[in-house]
Amino acid sequence: MPAVPPHRGLIRALLALFRGSDRAAGGLARLCTTLGQVALVCLGAHLAADHLDDQLLRGFFAAQAWLDLTLAGPLLRFSEAVGARYETLLFWDDLPLATLAAWSALIVELVACALLSASFLLTPRQVRLSWAAWRQALSVHALVLPVALSGVLSAGAWSMSMAVEDLLPAATWASVIAWIVAAAVGLRFGLPAWLRAVAALERSGKPLRDLAVALGILPLGLLAWQHGVPLWGWLP
Amino acid sequence: MRGFLELGLLAAVCTACWVRTPAGILAADLVAWARGAPGRDVLAAFSTEVPERVDEAIRQAVAQRQDAPATPLPPGWSPALDLAVRAHLGEQAAAQLILLPMDRPEATLERWALGEDVVERAIRRAAAAGEAEPSSLAAHRRYLPAEAQARAGEAVDEVLALATVLDLGWPVGATIRVTSSFGWRDHPVLHERRFHEGIDLGVPVGTPIAAAGAGTVSRARSDAINGQHLILSHGRGVTTAYCHGSALHVGPGEAVARGEVVMDSGSTGRSSGPHLHFGLRIDGRAVDPALFRPTGG
């Protein structure tokens, strides 16, 4: 009987350990998917919200200038006529606009994250995407959700790609790895989330609620498409 | 193998979310709160352009200006930029930076602080996302890694804000005396303790008041407290205010040149006599303008 080399047993044991722990890791697939999908939504929504912050700040400055030009004079004359404190009337004078814009963007971001995450988390897992079903469910929400969610998930995948690229030295292979990670994250977490959310769309019979949800996710969805998807620079 | 790959992907996405997004920061804050540890500022997740830590640098720059030798500077460098770099980044950094072309200070400072690769990568990303001017820091800031954003804030925004302040002139003759200083004082009209967010310069009614620096008029109006007053914005978060005038010569939105007469002094508003209230703010925070008073006055 030939002698079994001692290292073969060790290799077998290690392989068994690897397979066992891999299966255990695979058993967490459902939890992994859910967490990964929510994290991807958060990443994408934040990339869009960072732009929203800047746009809100520009808007606030413009509004402040407009109020100064149009309302400050009459309000000052009024405050002097009635003996009121003009600082109270001219409330916009010393508002911390940068902080206000950041907090507003943060609230919009968190609301959008919650609404977008709920769109696929609070739906059955096994649903099939069908054109006919989507047409039956046609509403403002059914139009906005696929667009907004795809933008945010794409922005999330790109954000992930940038985070990976930042950890690597500047080289072509780093960009390739970053794109592979983006594709893996997009396909593993993003696509199933989008399919699940869109396939589960149905007529709620509550148009006002649908409109409110659509308005809650539309700004970040559009900003995610506008600034969070690395396509536009490649177009002529 | 697939299970491990999934776990790896999940770990990467969750870590990025934890580090980069407000939702992650809030979750981290919750954990920190439960452990009794200090949390992170949730607004730090937003890329910001406002300088924050220039107070100490201002004091250093002012001290250095008193005994700065009149050395010739390379093209593109201004004395104000030179002082700002020395005060905020240190002599060693100044020695390195002075060898670099300074035709676009923002780009030079950024590349020096972050390195070519990091900046180029961010510019490439901004271009891919369709930003209008990807090479400007404002356009590609959000595509920088988080720690690089913080370094850009220190090495670019704060230095250039400080340089803008150090480049400001004086609105009246340098010999005009300060009648009320910056800081806590007994208010001459209200007779109560108040913080004076500027300085009062004793000038007679009708004295021409010059813009301390080039900029745009962000406010020109009259009210019961400040009288006829102006606020000029000089960029980089730096503004100057001129109050209690008798006549304004510029309107909101107008561009003004350094030294241009923008107002005649007076005693309008809450004033106990003819004077100019001159205020200076960096990112909305009041700074003592007397620190920047020209020497020899």
Image (cartoon, rainbow, N blue to C red):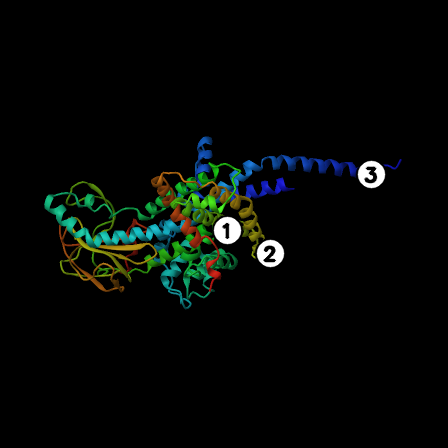
Which of the pair B75/B222 is nearer the observer?
B222
Label 3 crowding class (10 Å Cα cut-off): few <14, some 14-19, many 20+? few
Residue denoted by label 3:
A5
User: Are discs 1 and 3 less than 8 Å apart at CB?
Assistant: no
**Residue at mark 2: chain:** A
Residue closest to the eye, A227 or A169: A227
Residue found 31% across the figure and 55% down from its top: B238
Q: Please tell me in which quadrant of the rendered image residue A103 appears.
A: top left
Amino acid of disc 3: Pro
- Is A61 situated left or right of B98 in this image? left
Q: Which residue is mark 2?
A: A173
Of the 4 image quadrants, the one containing the N terminus of chain A is: top right
Instruction: Provide the chain ID for the residue under circle 3.
Output: A
For disc 1, the marked residue is: A158
- Look at label 2 and name its amino acid: Trp
Taking depth in this image into account, of B97 and A167 the one nearest to the observer is A167
Total residue callouts: 3
